Image (spheres, helix red, strand yellow):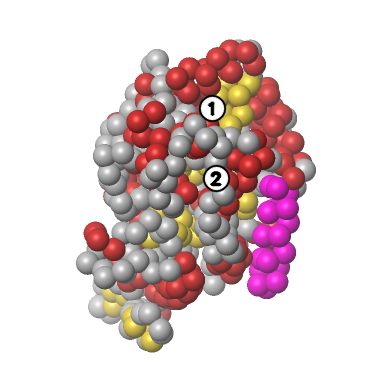
Amino acid sequence: MHLGLFLLAAGHHAGGWRFPGAESGTENFHLITRVAQEAESAKFDMVFFGDRLVTSRDSHPSMVTRPDPLVVLAMLAVQTRHIGLAATASTTYSDPFTLARALASVDLLSEGRAAWNIVTTVQDGSGNFSRSLHPESDERYAIAQEFVQVVQGLWRSWEADPYVRDKARGIYIDTDKMHALEHVGKYFQVKGPLNVTRSPQGEPVLIQAGSSGAGQQLGARCAEVIFTAQQDLQAAQEFYQALKRQVAAAGRDPAKVKVMPGLMPIIGRTAAEAREKLAQLQEFTDQSKARYMLSAELDLDLEGHDLDAPVPDLPQDDKSFSRRKLLLKIARDQRLTLRQLYHHIASSRGHQVVAGTAEDVAAHMLHWVDAGAADGFNIMPAWFPGGFEEFTRGVVPILQERGRFRREYEGRTLRAHLGLHDPV
């Protein structure tokens, strides 16, 4: 199976930073480096940094501050040797040429280990980017389709191995291997070519994390890894099968698109101890942020709603983003109050939580992969570094002993780790 580490330095549980022994700090670069190196020692495919462009005093502890993830990847490129380095960047609030250049530079710096998580940005960031309005969902995805096309075109500005460096003839680079893009579209006009050449893996791996209908269409057309939030096995199987069918319909090999649900492991020496850890984490959750976090995660204004009343019928339609649909389904199925739903969001933001022994967690992961619900997992520790070390030193050896996870890296690039085709 494939394993990624979703790294939020204050921990993925809203109260994780308060857990005994937890270290934290989104700008604690020494901690980020140590954790990434721990993931590399455990032979993870990649470490992943999410991003948000809007913040407030009521945000999740790990999201109040957020350094630019591409800068963090550049730092880690020289602190690691094998592990893939992935980061989120928005197609709604970025420029294709600038982003293509930055990602290609990280890919070169890391010798072929970079990846881009494509997002359209649900939250309105227009006030931070001198925009008059935030595009509606359909338009955001239309922009994203063209944005990705431009970025990939720019990455392919250069053929492989253009450097000649012939001192006798005075030829430094073969400019016949350089090609202008000349893109003119609805949203972007980009001449090119890019002024950065190809890395050993050709170009960064493309990741997509939206599970809505439009998100799945985008992922099926271009993504090589799909991050998703799934709660139960049947729903995960249905998502997996539907996504793979869409990939095939787009003329691509479904085996070359890896589906990796998020998973928060809470590990104890016994199942009872793991449940106690989870209960302790819940006690650390800040109740004062309940309404704000609910509103942010559901993208709805919940002012005036009683937190201790059942979750009301909230608006949603085919354009509602996937996380809202998932969370509201959980609330209906489990008959949760808004406050109880907040605790669920504070725990994992809709991703699955597995509390048990290392054997329990390994068995859960193997069952999902064998049942056709996942190709691997994006691990979301509740706190750092201990919550992650319990996984790398407890669960990973079990997976390795059963022949289901690598003991050593067989290649140097992220594409090699994931078993992906080289790009065009």
Mark 1 residue type = Thr
Residue where numbered disc 2 is placed: 312
Asked if residue 170 lies left or right of residue 59, the reply is left
Q: Which stretch did the figure color magenta?
A: 235-253
In this orientation, which residue lies closer to the viewer: 250 or 20?
Answer: 20
Image coordinates of residue 422 in percent, x first then y, are: 56, 64
Residue occupying the point 52% across, 35% down: 309
The Cα atoms of the two marked residues, 2 and 1, are separated by 40 Å
Identity of the residue drawn at 34% across and 83% down: 189
| Mark 1: secondary structure | helix
Q: Quadrant of the N terminus?
A: top right
Q: Residue 366: say if magenta.
A: no
Residue behind mark 1 = 392
Which residue occupies 54% across, 27% down?
392
> How many labels sit on residues?
2
Instruction: Identify residue type, mark 2.
Output: Pro
Q: In this view, does 318 lie to the left or right of 380?
A: right
Residue closest to the far right: 371
As displayed, is residue 132 above or below residue 11? below
Q: Is the magenta stretch mostly helix, strand or loop?
A: helix
Q: In which quarter of the image is the C terminus?
A: bottom right
Front residue of this view, candidates 229 and 394:
229
Measuring from the top left, give residue 37's x and y in whole percent.
42, 33
Q: Do the residues labelled 2 and 1 touch (CB within 8 Å)?
A: no
Instruction: Report the mark closest to the observer, 2 or 1.
Output: 2
Indicate the position of residue 56 as horizontal and vertical percent values.
Answer: 27, 44
Q: How crowded is mark 1: few (under 14 residues within 10 Å), some or many (20 or more)?
A: many
Looking at the picture, tell me which residue is in the foreground, 111 or 240: 240
Q: Can you give x and y, in whole percent of width and height, for residue 362 in the image?
A: 67, 29
Tell me which corner region of the image, top left, top right, bottom left or bottom right, holds residue 27: top left
Q: Can residue 139 be seen in this view?
A: yes
